[in-house]
Image (cartoon, rainbow, N blue to C red):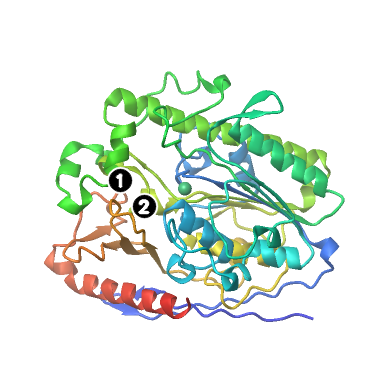
């Protein structure tokens, strides 16, 4: 018995040939999950990294970084070149990944009450577990929930900083330890298929409390040592100096002093960040070897994503939180060995972290709850069915006084950014002519109508997301 699932979406935007912006909003999703017995369903390994920017992958065009195992997964699967997070911060982004809901709707972030039961009731591990999956979690969870997370996962191994751990009389690098725990879960699950493992590496997140910030295994000490790490185009001093006061001296700038305030420190810190990503890649290599060894490679889907982007000295900043592409754009790769009608190698349409949960459910043949705001990416992977995201809305609602709240609309061509507490300052970039967002066009007379339309679109998006809270 097949069922038809529809989701109407409220965000979208069309530009007419006359350059007028028309708000229209509606996208439609159809999924016809095959009703199979639970034992025929695929295993799913969902790997999330912490603070890995979209271009920190060889397969994304980075000619310095070494990520051969992830490149291999991308080669066999589908890479999404324009994947974004709806909120660029660990806590809110992870809640969005779990539930398929925007921050404005799930209302979870640092120093906020836990994710409500009605929202964890639709999260992907809960629904997979309910359908008969063995669900496992390893690594940094980063989300508080009203319900015990035992109701979401059959097996839980939560851990985090510091990067060096004492385990059974040995000192272990955290990424290696998390990899071992992931492998252990798969070994324990192989007679209880299907399983879904959510593996959330702590790396390459800096250990903020440590002067060194970045930690990697000694075997990688020599890697990148002779490289000259590229300095971002927006790292120049006059760029930072041109900011309004509320964007100066913020948390992004504070951490810039920790990491990038001299050319020598910049080189060393960026190399450390790269080495941490290579260490993740090596661990992922061990995980894919184990999938082969266990004889489950033809039925195990791998989904790989980052939880937010990263300023590596761009704009005189460090870390994430704001709405520029370096902060909201993340890597996303999905490899389904069953093929399942997948024809695409790369998808350049804009997709979101809130799409992960509905995609995982769709791949597992489980109905997608109407309440979910993300959409399954399967139609984009197969080239069949409907998915449309002509524009995306992103936001960050932190209560940290040193991080200005911000909201944006991004289309293929335009980026509109506003700061709710500083309505006088707007950023507008033409991404086709200016992909690095160097030239703020907001004061140009010719763009004023466009700005009014983007303001309305932000307001409408927020209204819709609040109504669904
Ligand atoms: Ca993060």
Task: Please state the horizontal and vertical placement of residue 262, each as a whole percent of the image.
Answer: 27, 27
Residue 254 location (% of width, % of height): 28, 40
> What's the distance in space between the residues labelled 1 and 2, CA to CA?
9 Å
Give the residue drawn at x 63%, y 40%: 72
Q: Looking at the rendered structure, which numbered label has been put on residue 44? A: none
Q: Earlier in the sequence, mark 1 or mark 2?
A: 1
Determine the residue positioned at 56% across, 40% down: 160
Q: Which mark is residue 321?
A: 2
Q: Quadrant of residue 125?
A: bottom right
Q: Is residue 411 above or below residue 182?
A: below
Quadrant the N terminus occupies: bottom right
Whether residue 337 sits left or right of residue 53 in the image: it is right
* Whether residue 380 can be seen here: no
In the displayed structure image, the side of residue 423 where residue 407 appears, left or right = right
To which residue does mark 1 refer?
251
Regarding residue 132, the answer to whether it shows in the image is yes
Which residue is most to the right? 191
Residue 202, located in which quarter of the rendered image? top right
């Amino acid at each position: 018995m097949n069922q038809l699932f529809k989701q109407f979406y409220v965000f979208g935007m069309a530009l007419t040939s006359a350059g007028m912006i028309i708000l229209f909003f509606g996208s439609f999703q159809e999924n016809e999950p095959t009703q199979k017995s639970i034992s025929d369903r695929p295993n799913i390994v969902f790997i999330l990294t912490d603070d890995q920017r979209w271009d920190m992958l060889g397969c994304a065009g980075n000619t310095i970084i070494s990520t051969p195992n992830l490149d291999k997964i991308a080669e066999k699967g589908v890479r999404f070149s324009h994947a974004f997070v709806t909120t660029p911060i660990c806590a809110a982004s992870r809640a969005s990944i779990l539930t398929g809901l925007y921050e404005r709707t799930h209302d979870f972030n640092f120093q906020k009450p836990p994710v409500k039961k009605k929202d964890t009731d639709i999260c992907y591990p809960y629904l997979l577990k309910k359908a008969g999956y063995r669900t496992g979690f390893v690594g940094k969870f980063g989300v508080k929930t009203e319900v015990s997370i035992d109701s979401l996962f059959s097996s839980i191994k939560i851990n985090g900083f510091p990067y060096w751990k004492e385990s059974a009389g040995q000192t272990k690098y955290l990424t290696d330890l998390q990899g071992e725990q992931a492998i252990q879960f798969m070994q324990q699950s192989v007679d209880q298929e299907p399983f879904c493992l959510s593996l959330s590496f702590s790396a390459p997140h800096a250990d903020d409390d440590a002067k060194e910030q970045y930690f990697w295994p000694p075997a990688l000490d020599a890697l990148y040592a002779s490289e000259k790490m590229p300095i971002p185009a927006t790292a120049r001093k006059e760029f930072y100096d041109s900011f309004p006061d509320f964007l100066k001296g913020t948390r992004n700038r504070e951490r810039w002093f920790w990491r990038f305030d001299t050319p020598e420190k910049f080189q060393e810190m960026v190399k450390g960040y790269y080495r941490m990503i290579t260490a993740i890649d090596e661990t992922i290599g061990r995980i894919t070897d184990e999938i082969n060894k266990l004889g489950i490679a033809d039925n195990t889907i791998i989904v790989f994503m980052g939880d937010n982007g990263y300023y590596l000295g761009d704009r005189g900043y460090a870390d994430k939180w704001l709405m520029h592409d370096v902060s909201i754009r993340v890597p996303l790769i999905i490899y389904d060995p069953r093929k399942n009608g997948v024809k695409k190698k790369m998808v350049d349409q804009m997709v979101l972290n809130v799409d992960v949960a509905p995609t995982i459910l769709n791949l597992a043949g489980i109905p997608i709850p109407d309440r979910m705001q993300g959409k399954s990416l399967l139609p984009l992977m197969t080239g069949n069915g409907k998915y449309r995201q002509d524009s995306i809305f992103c936001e960050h609602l932190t209560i940290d006084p040193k991080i200005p709240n911000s909201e944006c609309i991004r289309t293929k061509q335009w980026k509109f950014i506003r700061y709710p507490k500083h309505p006088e300052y707007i950023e507008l970039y033409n991404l086709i002519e200016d992909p690095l967002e160097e030239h703020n066009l907001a004061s140009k007379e010719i763009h004023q109508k466009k700005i009014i339309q983007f303001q309305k679109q932000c307001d409408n998006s927020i209204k819709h997301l609040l109504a669904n809270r």
